[in-house]
Image (cartoon, helix red, strand yellow):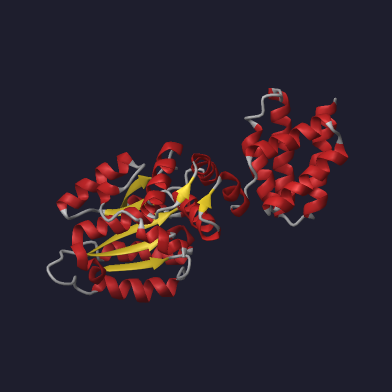
Amino acid sequence: MSDLWVEKHRPRTVVEIRGQAAVVQRLTTYAGNKSFPHLLFSGPPGTGKTTAAMALTKDIFGEHFRENLLEMNASDERGLESIRSKVKQFARTAPYGKAAFKIIFLDEADALTADAQGALRRIMEQYAETCRFILSCNYSSKIIEPIQSRCAVFRFRPLSSHEVSEQISKVSKEENLDITDDAVEALTHISQGDLRKAITGLQVAAALQPKITRDLIYETSATAPPEELHRYIASCKDDGFHVARRRLRELLDTYGLAGTDFVNQLHRELYNIDFLSEISKLELTEWMAEIDYRLVEGGGEQIQLDAMTARLVKHLKT
């Protein structure tokens, strides 16, 4: 359902895209010229890469854009055979109607294997006259250099807090949702510039009760409110190990946090805690990095988080 909601509110033309002014300016020129080189969209999730590709395609081909578009998720079809068969077969056929070229959109192209990227490189070269490629990825460093050099590279940045809150308010109004200002602020906080994550959080909350509040947003998004994380650190400083450990357990149970989620959220809030010195923040960051690594490598969650709590108490009590 969340994908359908995002699709419903997706801009229909390039000029409707929000939060990527530099990208929109260049893509608008391509849309006006009805032509563009191969494109590589790079940036964090939920910042508009797929939206930009689809909007540009609609601007160029109009309502019947599907006839001249092949859209593939490269993470699902990441092997050499998919590139050699599906992509090459589409690229070698003539454009539909009066179109000058076709478009192949490869989403999550950084998931393509090295062999598949090598084959794609050759296809991009062979069919440049009748086919344009749009590749999107989270990490451009995972795209081989020969493909990058054939593309105009667009860097998408995370959306600002103002842009996310503005879009959430717009969607809420269109959907007739009763949402508080605190809830909009909470969605902005948990999204970290990822508009898709914010809209998904809004949809989940809206499905549970008619009035969307700040508490509901945090309860349904596996995110602890900043003040709860501050209280955990304060317990480590003032109350000792057992009280801090108990507060940690309550946090995990109440908000449904995994160990890595808790460490990452605590790290994000660490620099907003006024009663910690600069040296303390540096040392705590090193410990959290170590605990995060242990958790990712398969360390027991409870004992690792208890170990982190013990080190926090020992450091802050001295």
Give x and y (percent) for residue 9: 36, 56
* Image height of 45 relative to 78, above or below: above
Q: Is residue 45 visible?
A: no
Residue 75 is situated, as x and y percent measured from the top left of the image, at 48, 65
**Above or below for 70 versus 276:** below
Q: Quadrant of residue 102?
A: bottom left
| Number of numbered callouts drawn | 0
Specify the quadrant of the image occupied by residue 81.
bottom left
Residue 199 lies, in percent from the top left, at 46, 53
On-image quarter of the C terminus: top right
Residue at 41% across / 58% down in the picture? 6
Q: Residue at x 53, y 40 (%)?
A: 182
Give above or below for 275 relative to 305. above
Q: Is residue 201 left or right of residue 287?
A: left
Query: Seen from this angle, which residue lies furthest left?
Result: 98
Where residue 275 sits, quadrant-wise, is top right
299 left or right of 56 in image: right
* Residue occupying the point 57% across, 44% down: 214
